[in-house]
Image (tube, rainbow, N blue to C red):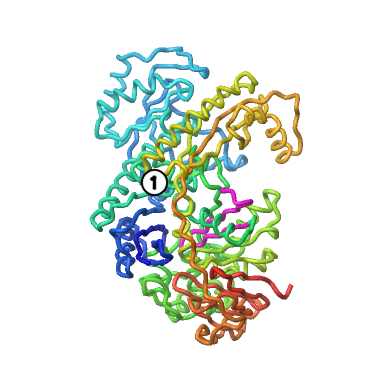
Amino acid sequence: MAQEYWTISIDTGGTFTDSVARADDGTMLVAKVPSTPDDPGRALIQSIDVLAGQGLDVKNVHIICHGTTIATNAILTGQFSKVALLTTSGFRDVLAIRNGTRPDIYNLRVPRPTELVTRENRIEVRERITRGGEVLQKLTDNEIDRVIEELRIIQPEAIAICLLFSYSNDDHEVRLATKVREAFPNLSVSVSSEVVREFREYPRTSTTVINAGLRPIVGSYLEKAQQSLTDSGITAPFLVMQSNGGCAIATRSASDAHRLVLSGPAGGAAGLIQLAKQHQISKVIGLDMGGTSTDICLIKDGLLPLQSSQTVNDHTLLAPSVDIHTIGSGGGSIAYADITGRLKVGPISAKAVPGPAAYLRGGNQATLTDAHVVLGTLGNSNLASNLTLDKNAAVRVITELAGKLGRDVTETALAIVSLSVAQMVRALRRVSVERGLDPREFTLVPFGGAGPLHVGLLLRHLNLGRALVPNLPGLFSANGLLTAGVRLDAAQTLLTPYAVNDIESYALWFAAKHLELAEKLSSDGVEQNQISFETAIDARYLGQGYELTIPLTPTVAGIADLPELFHKAHFDLYGHFSVYQPIEVVTLRTSAKGAFPEIPPAPLEIGNQAPEPQALIGYERVIFPDFPEGIDTAHYQRERLLAGNILDGPCIVQQMDSTTAVLPGQRVTVTLLGDLLIEEVNS
């Protein structure tokens, strides 16, 4: 069968840039190249070149989807565009006051978070609109002219406009934005009523400013990437993964830059849903461990866990995002002795450059990867991008650290691994036990380059029954990008008491937004029959400070069920409810999703329970926590394993993109799709 249809998904991480190309005949090509932090787009093009060298026909690429950390890194590193903020008179210091909470209420010396816009670059605008949308103080042309003159003095790189209660009435914002755009045609102007029509002044202002500050950076990056793809001969639609677990066309993503903050990790969450569906599993916990960080996501009943806001580098962002918990622990996490002589691991990472010492790329500090090389769990095999593991280099840096700790090399390496696993266990408990969920009811899905390396230890420490290692764990996030499809979101804050007479107006809003979002998706090339919608209403008891998101059907009959649905959700979460307390409708929410053409994975060849002899690489002495003297351990080449093969631990399963370490007393079964099912057999 001729390969007439290709899809490409590329995920840029802190250490590697992963790429997966799929053809309509089931052919799959993969590439893993080192990330290029100085210019992330360079690694993207290098990935395309590697895939083309393997047989990718760039002229027949129909879709290319990209997960990027460009927005995340800009916020975390403070490499933000110079923004000028225009806000209602009297609200100049909203970004400084924030929401009034303190991370440590008993600490009088908590350092203040960095302000997104310095005070001298925040301009007060004399105008005022009430919460209900009535004009108290009219915005005059003279006032607009005065504001524009102040902007000329500041000379910003981007402009954010966030006037009080503009989500109820945006007339003043629209007039002001029109004049500002005319005066500064070459600058990005972000308007809160266009970016986020939701309440709460600090998050709304913060979101608008983040959007303004990211637009020049994200827009420039995506424009260069688009041009590079065109130069490579690819004319297919260029899509970017958003924080909400769905993709959007790159031109729209450049305008909605604030929606890309969790672009990379969201691809893994989308892949988790597909994997759970393939194995008919209702509850999974994904653990995506790369070179710099670990992202943990819990999924129930095949539903993407979304939250309406997120916190990034102490800044609140109002944008639907996948509920992912991130810790600074990865394969490149640096291990060191603090001033008290105690061992610490992370969050500082050796990253892609210079990387762990064992990579022989200039790294001279001990990392988690180096500890595994010393223990033998990573073996001596070559990794992606022709990386080799040099045990002597790893031993050298671990020995140096061991001297500072007063321990021997083996003890130090085991301690580094144990401390890293403890950090992951704590994070896994945070998304499960601390939310009232029993992790033993979930299947652990470790992926990323370093996730499967710790699967055996995590199973044992958490007392879990089983884990599922995907077929290509190191490329799982990239592979998951195209399973999500495209997604657009819309929201409108109302803050009105729930009334039967208002139900029809809510239904009309949903209908109008569905039509608007469907038109946008159609213009992006999505077929009408592939578009679906999700709707919800944020509600609370009148007088409460926070709300619950209640999914429902956007019809008159469906919205009429809101009180019953809200009472049940309130009881499930808090253990009580009151049918006599009035309910307030806070925000209407909806999203439109469009599916990509699905290319089913090819099943694996079926073999016997015993692996074929060529699958066995050999036996090596490996040190595990309960076997400090080492134990003879079988090493297998994963690409040579067949469906139905059973491996007993201890064993190491090696492949290009990751390594899976299985402890004594655990068993591995190769599934029909090539995934590794790992279970405890000696409990």
Question: Which residue, given by chain and number where applicable, does mark 1 sit on?
Answer: 78
Q: Is residue 675 above or below residue 626?
A: above
Q: Quadrant of residue 28?
A: bottom left
Q: Residue at x 46, y 76 (%)?
A: 394
Which segment is the magenta one? 284-304
Q: 574 or 477: which is nearer to us?
A: 477
- Secondary structure at numbered mark 1: loop
Question: Is residue 296 a member of the stretch shown in magenta?
Answer: yes
- Residue 281, percent from left and from top: 63, 58
Q: Residue 532 or 653: which is nearer the viewer? A: 532
Q: Quadrant of the N terminus?
A: bottom left
Which is nearer the eye, 67 or 233? 233
Q: Is residue 682 left or right of residue 325?
A: right
Percent from the top left, x then y, of residue 18? 40, 62
Residue 215, position as x, y percentages in the image: 34, 40
Identified at 25% across, 31% down, the residue is: 185
Query: Residue placed at 25% from the left, 57% from the top?
Result: 233
